[in-house]
Image: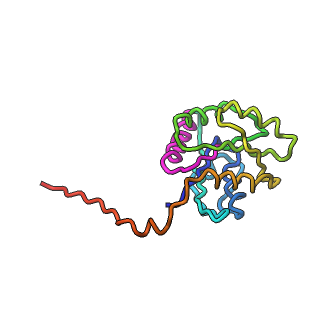
Amino acid sequence: GCPQVVIVGRPNVGKRSLLNWLAGVRVAIVDDQPGVTRDRVTYLMNHEDRFFELVDTGGMGFQDMDDLTSHIEQQIDLAIDSADLILLVVDTRDGMLPLDQEVARRLRQVQTPIMLVANKADDESFDTQADEFYRLGRGKPIRVSTLQNRNRAVLLNLIVEELPPQQDDVAAETDDPEMKVAIVGR
């Protein structure tokens, strides 16, 4: 199928805003209340003749730390199951919070490529602030700002570079269809 690029991160780092910004349309509700957007939202993207699905795993509604942690676990499980690439989003202005480290820690055993996106880096003056996210062990943070429309093309190009090689459509059509049959009963 179509490669999936899944957006994860703690609440209020701008995951849904990032999806809308990359999509170029308002795909989903954006609200400052944590937990407003709980459902997965998927948007089909085309960049440089590559199609991929951008998936926001949903905002996290939570009452307490335990509830939040289990929600992050669910979010990451969903991401692992379907993702060809994971965008780990952090908030440059807030800086690194314990929850960012928790999300990164849970992603450690994941084999899927992970790209670190430092949102809310509105201009160069924020770039050094983004440097602290190197500590998450996910390489160089890609500094973006959905608000100031900063580095959108850079991020899209990097995403396309990370996608798995394109399947040859002709080969896909000539493959024998696969049918799984289970016979049950006494």
Name which residue lies at 70% across and 64% down: 25
| Rendering coords of residue 128 (x, y %) | 82, 35
Name which residue lies at 77% across and 40% down: 92
| Rendering coords of residue 21 (x, y %) | 72, 58
Is residue 32 placed above or below 43 in the rendered structure? Answer: above
Q: Residue 184 versus residue 143: which sits nearer the camera?
A: 143
| Rendering coords of residue 159 (x, y %) | 65, 52
- Magenta-span inclusion, residue 69: yes
| Rendering coords of residue 59 (x, y %) | 61, 48
Counting every numbered tag in the picture gives: 0
Name which residue lies at 59% across and 38% down: 63
Left or right placement of residue 24 versus residue 108 in this view: right
Q: Residue 174 versus residue 80: which sits nearer the camera?
A: 174
In magenta, the rendered stretch is 66-88
Residue farthest to the right?
A: 125
Q: Residue 128 versus residue 89: which sits nearer the camera?
A: 128
